[in-house]
Image (cartoon, rainbow, N blue to C red):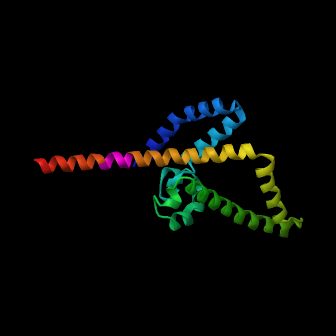
């Protein structure tokens, strides 16, 4: 399995290709920037290795504590953390849940202090409408970028593990022949 620094290098080498192909397909700089930004964020901070004490986990700085329950609940390289599509979906749902819990708590305190009316259901409905109806292409670009970043990590892990297994088998065959 590649180290965190190796994953970073792979990400930075792939990023221009991701941006180039995206721009070539869409001819839209905004979608290219959104997808490339999602790719970079996912590969550097939001990837499958948030379930261990990794460089991705450490990059969250003082906020990395939000990932402790995630680390405790998921085993490393499980389908829920390293699975294509499902891993990104689980991380997104987990992050949205944490943001929702913290936001509700902070808004409740603000309502007690300042006494303003706020309905979280209406707010959530408006945000969901905005993401799905007003900006569907941007949402698709962002989610695609997040998944591509995770896939670059998963594929490099798989290639590295596969290479090491083949090398180990080859060395074992060499020892048996002697």
Horizontal and vertical percent position of residue 4? 45, 46
Q: Nearer the viewer, residue 79 or 127?
A: 79
Instruction: Please give the name of the residue rendered at 51% of the width and 67% of the height, measured from the top-left corner.
Output: 72
Specify whether 82 is left or right of 168: right
Instruction: Please give the name of the residue rendered at 38% of the width and 46% of the height, measured from the top-left corner.
Output: 160
Task: Give the tally of numbered discs.
Answer: 0
Is residue 2 something that shows in the picture? no
Q: Is residue 28 magenta?
A: no
Instruction: Please give the name of the residue rendered at 57% of the width and 61% of the height, measured from the top-left corner.
Output: 67
Specify whether 173 is left or right of 106: left
38 in relation to 82, above or below: above
Q: Which residues are magenta?
A: 160-165
Our reading of the magenta stretch's main secondary structure is: helix
Horizontal and vertical percent position of residue 177? 12, 48
Q: Quarter-wise, where is residue 20 in the image?
A: top right
Specify whether 45 is left or right of 178: right
Is residue 150 something that shows in the picture? yes
Horizontal and vertical percent position of residue 111? 84, 67
123 in relation to 171, above or below: below
């Amino acid at each position: 399995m590649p180290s965190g620094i190796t994953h970073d290098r792979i990400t930075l080498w792939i990023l221009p290709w991701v941006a180039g192909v995206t721009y070539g397909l869409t001819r839209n700089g905004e979608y290219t920037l959104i997808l490339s930004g999602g790719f970079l964020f996912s590969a550097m901070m939001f990837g499958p290795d948030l379930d261990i004490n990794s460089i991705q986990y450490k990059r969250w700085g003082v906020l990395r504590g939000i990932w402790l329950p995630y680390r405790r609940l998921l085993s490393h390289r499980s389908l829920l953390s390293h699975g294509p599509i499902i891993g990104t979906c689980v991380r997104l749902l987990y992050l949205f849940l944490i943001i929702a819990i913290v936001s509700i708590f902070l808004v409740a305190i603000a309502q007690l202090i300042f006494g303003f009316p706020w309905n979280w259901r209406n707010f959530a409905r408006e945000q969901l409408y905005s993401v799905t109806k007003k900006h569907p292409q941007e949402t698709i670009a962002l989610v695609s970028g997040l998944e591509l970043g995770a896939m670059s990590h998963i594929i490099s892990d798989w290639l590295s593990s596969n290479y090491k297994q083949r090398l180990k088998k080859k060395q074992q065959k060499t020892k048996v022949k002697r």
